[in-house]
């Protein structure tokens, strides 16, 4: 790989052209129009998750009134949307805000080195389109690359996998022309991907089975939000969207609090709903009764009860068991039952990869993620002028991203008005810390040791409450934990030396 001798300079470098990066760019262009910025995207297209995953039926599991941006109303009748429509929404946002010329595709950030003397990041980027390495110098980095590895999904080691004569597919790398018509399909997993695939593939497959080690809490929701559509009709898109957003934020929080405070009540309610959707005599407790409390892991949504409807029709089934080994013709379970299959889909989760795996250094010192503490859910202690965007795990991702982007722009304005060019958060070394995410999902638990930490209270927590974050991020911009510096400070230090 050749290295370019030129270095581009921008005020803000945004990493990732998914829903977080596109949102950050729109906030910058409206709230800080004097700031120059570039978006670098490792892949060949915008859209992030919604362009990467191509498996049948891929859709949101949040309503688009809260998953969409606050500044851009979701106007479709359907509140739960499929990936192509979400991609359209993101591309509309790019076009409406003139972001196309700001995006550099096939630009993968490899490393970023901060210099306190220059108050800038020097960012090394590999270009897949030209095969060269380029550099961008930026005063700020806003990392909107999400928190999972785009290159590789998680697949456990399965005994005897090599013996299987059929096809094994991971949803993250779905073959473009996979023919499953008339074939027996087994989907390993019980999360959002698995419960989406089951009804999406059932009509064409000979039969489809969801093989789960542990059940998941599943709740049906209507694909269309009748109240939202009525509000839009009565008040117009903008006002109707704003009210629907408030309604849905409150509903999401109420459900989460109910599950956390009264788990037995929530468990009974969910079981009753599930039982009403399934055939009489169906073993509900075997297949829909997780050993953990509701919202210890994310609840799965099924629009218009599509999963339950598919089971009622006999086109799909659920098996709760552990895998003993793959065989030539399928999967042998620990119970002794064998599931015959032509295609096995390993919907077994993600690999977390914080900030896209970028190697960070501050004045020549490597940044160890587990040694940092998150500040306001956006900055890392001891790392100047670096923001990362991680959304909610118990509500719509984008709700938090919007608040973070607002605060980010306010912080830039504060620094300009005080002639600062550097800011970093300083955590008390004696402050007790805990894992970044209080979430039981396997993909989170596998990666906790490599992630930043959080503290016991604000502003050092990775809050999962929209209302708490709204108070924090729309409050005072600066506090005693933020340290600022400008050219005058460096000049004074130089004279003093």
Image: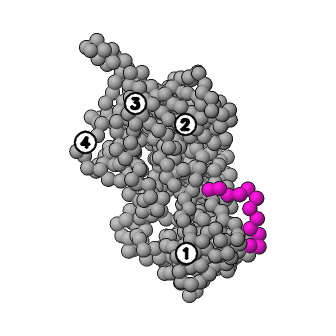
Most foreground residue, 311 or 76? 311
Q: How is the image coloured?
A: one colour
Contact flag, marks 3 and 4 (Cβ < 8 Å): no
- SS at badge 2: strand
Q: Nearer the viewer, residue 4 or 430?
A: 4
Q: Quick one: 57 or 265, which is closer to the camera?
A: 57
Mark 4–mark 2 distance (CA, rounded to whole Å)? 30 Å
| 425 displayed left or right of 167 | left
Secondary structure mainly formed by the magenta segment? loop
Give the CA distance from mark 2 to mark 3.
Answer: 18 Å
Q: Nearer the viewer, mark 1 or mark 4?
A: 1
Residue on which disc 1 sits = 323
Name the residue that disc number 4 marks.
429
Q: Earlier in the sequence, mark 1 or mark 2?
A: 2
Residue tagged 2:
109
Q: Are marks 4 and 2 in contact (CB under 8 Å)?
A: no
Are there few (<14), some (14-19), or many (20+) residues within 10 Å of tag 3? few
Report the number of discs: 4
CA gap, disc 1 to disc 2? 39 Å
């Amino acid at each position: 790989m050749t290295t370019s001798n030129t270095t581009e300079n921008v005020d803000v470098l945004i990493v990732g052209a998914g829903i977080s990066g596109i949102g950050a760019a729109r906030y910058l262009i409206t709230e800080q129009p004097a700031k120059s910025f570039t978006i670098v995207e490792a892949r060949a297209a915008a859209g992030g998750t919604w362009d990467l995953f191509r498996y049948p039926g891929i859709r949101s599991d949040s309503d688009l009134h809260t998953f969409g941006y606050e500044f851009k109303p979701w106007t479709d009748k359907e509140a739960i949307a499929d990936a192509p429509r979400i991609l359209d929404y993101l591309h509309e946002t790019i076009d409406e805000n003139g972001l196309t010329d700001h995006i550099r595709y096939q630009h993968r950030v490899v490393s970023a080195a901060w210099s306190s003397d220059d108050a800038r990041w020097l960012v090394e980027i590999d270009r897949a389109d030209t095969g060269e390495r380029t550099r961008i110098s930026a005063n700020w980095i806003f990392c909107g690359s999400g928190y999972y590895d785009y290159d590789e999904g998680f697949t456990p080691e399965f005994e005897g996998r090599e013996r299987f004569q059929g096809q094994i597919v991971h949803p993250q790398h779905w073959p473009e022309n996979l023919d499953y018509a008339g074939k027996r399909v087994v989907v390993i997993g019980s999360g959002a991907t698995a419960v989406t695939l089951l009804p999406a593939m059932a009509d064409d497959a000979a039969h489809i089975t969801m093989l789960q080690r542990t059940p998941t809490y599943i709740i049906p929701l209507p694909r269309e939000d009748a109240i939202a559509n009525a509000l839009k009709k009565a008040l117009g898109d903008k006002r109707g969207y704003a009210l629907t957003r408030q309604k849905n934020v409150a509903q999401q929080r109420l459900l989460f609090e109910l599950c956390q405070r009264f788990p037995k009540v929530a468990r009974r309610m969910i079981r009753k709903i599930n039982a009403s959707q399934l055939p009489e005599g169906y073993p509900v407790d075997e297949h829909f009764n997780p050993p953990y409390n509701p919202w210890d892991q994310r609840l799965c949504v099924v629009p218009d009860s599509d999963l339950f409807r598919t089971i009622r029709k006999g086109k799909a089934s659920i098996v709760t068991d552990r895998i003993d080994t793959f065989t030539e013709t399928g999967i042998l379970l620990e119970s002794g039952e064998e599931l015959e299959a032509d295609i096995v889909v390993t919907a077994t989760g993600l690999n977390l990869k914080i900030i896209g795996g970028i190697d960070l250094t501050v004045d020549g010192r490597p940044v160890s993620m587990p040694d940092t503490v998150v500040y306001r859910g956006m900055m890392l202690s001891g790392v100047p002028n670096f923001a990362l965007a991680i959304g909610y795990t118990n509500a719509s991702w984008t709700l938090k991203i919007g608040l973070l982007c607002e605060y980010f722009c306010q912080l830039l304005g504060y620094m300009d008005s005080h002639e600062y060019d550097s800011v970093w958060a300083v955590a008390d070394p004696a402050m007790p810390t805990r894992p970044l995410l209080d979430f039981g999902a396997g993909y989170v638990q596998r990666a906790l040791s490599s992630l930043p930490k959080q503290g016991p209270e604000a502003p050092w927590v990775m809050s999962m409450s929209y209302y708490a974050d709204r108070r924090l991020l729309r409050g005072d911009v600066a506090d005693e934990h933020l340290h600022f510096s400008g050219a005058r400070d460096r000049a004074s230090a130089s004279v003093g030396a």
